[in-house]
Amino acid sequence: MAQENSHQQRDRVRERFTRTAEVFSSFVLTTRTADAELLVEMAAPRGGECVLDVACGPGTFALQFAPRVQTAVGLDVTPAILAQARAAAVAAGASNLFFVNGDSAALPFAAGTFDIVCCGYSLHHMSDAAAALREFARVVRRGGRVAVADMVVAPPGSFAVNNAIEQARDSSHVRTLLPDEFPSMVEAAGLRVSECRTTVSPRSFKSWMSVGGWKLGEETYEATRRLMAQSIEGDTSGFHPLLAEDDSGDIHFQQTTLFIVAEKP
Ligand SMILES: C[S@@+](CC[C@H](N)C(=O)[O-])C[C@H]1O[C@@H](n2cnc3c(N)ncnc32)[C@H](O)[C@@H]1O
């Protein structure tokens, strides 16, 4: 039963990131450079490492690691997004960056293969994030580092309201973690957390929906907008949403991200 759920989840992820491969890749490759630089800085490579970027998308994090390590490998479950990643690596001249199609639930590598394993903005798409973190811990060597970043539900947001909005927009969204449970889950995977940092990024609802593949007037767009608008009073989603002051109908909100680096003892 659990395996059937994870197969269905993999299909939902592939459908979403195949449908939006171009718009999503273009968005993250132009807006997440600072996030990727922050995670690289926290993981502190010295130059000789072999790095794995799990759920790499178009190579957002792998592309920033590549010039600072010996070898970088990006793994993703969606072939269409890997095509974007390969094109981005060629454009960047990253000849030490390779890509593999695979699932974070069963990484196709032996224990202790990597010096650093990173994962950006993807645990919330995994049917069992705790098990994925255990996989990251398995394939990193002792003394190596696991560097993960993902959105969290910011106070005073409610877990249920926040995730209902995310799932209305994206059926491949499983769950955004709470700020306290994320580091606990990393530790439960057998890793020792050495540093946590939080960032807040401004977002526009219209742009967020466009990156999700939805246009104004479509049912998914309108249903998600209703939920986001309902969460303005009392900030029940934790997105700190505010109606735009012009007559665009847009909603400005904030995405809170937790960056964690942990060592494998
Ligand atoms: C929100 S994107 C993040 C991409 C990139 N890391 C970034 O931050 O820009 C999520 C990515 O995770 C991939 N993904 C989701 N579940 C996965 C899984 N179980 N195994 C491997 N990749 C997965 C999707 O195909 C997609 O490319």
Image (spheres, rainbow, N blue to C red):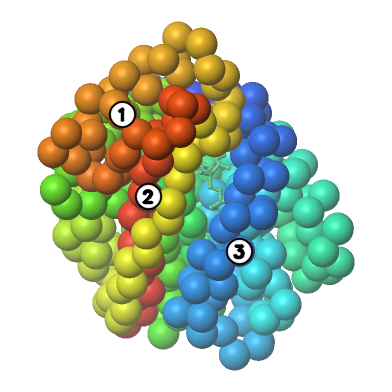
Residue marked by disc 1: 228
Q: Residue at x 37, y 22 (%)?
A: 224
Q: Position of residue 158 (x, y in %)?
A: 15, 39
Badge 3 marks a residue whose secondary structure is helix
| Residue 142 location, quadrant | bottom left
- Residue type highlighted by circle 3: Thr
Between the residue at mark 1 and the residue at mark 3, the CA separation in whole angstroms equals 27 Å
Badge 2 marks a residue whose secondary structure is strand
Farthest residue toward the front? 246
- Residue type highlighted by circle 1: Met
Residue marked by disc 2: 255
Q: Position of residue 72 (x, y in %)?
A: 67, 68
In the image, residue 191 sits, relative to residue 212, either above or below, namely: below
Label 3: how many Cα within 10 Å (few below 14, some 14–19, many 20+): some
Q: Position of residue 192 (x, y in %)?
A: 27, 77
Badge 1 marks a residue whose secondary structure is helix
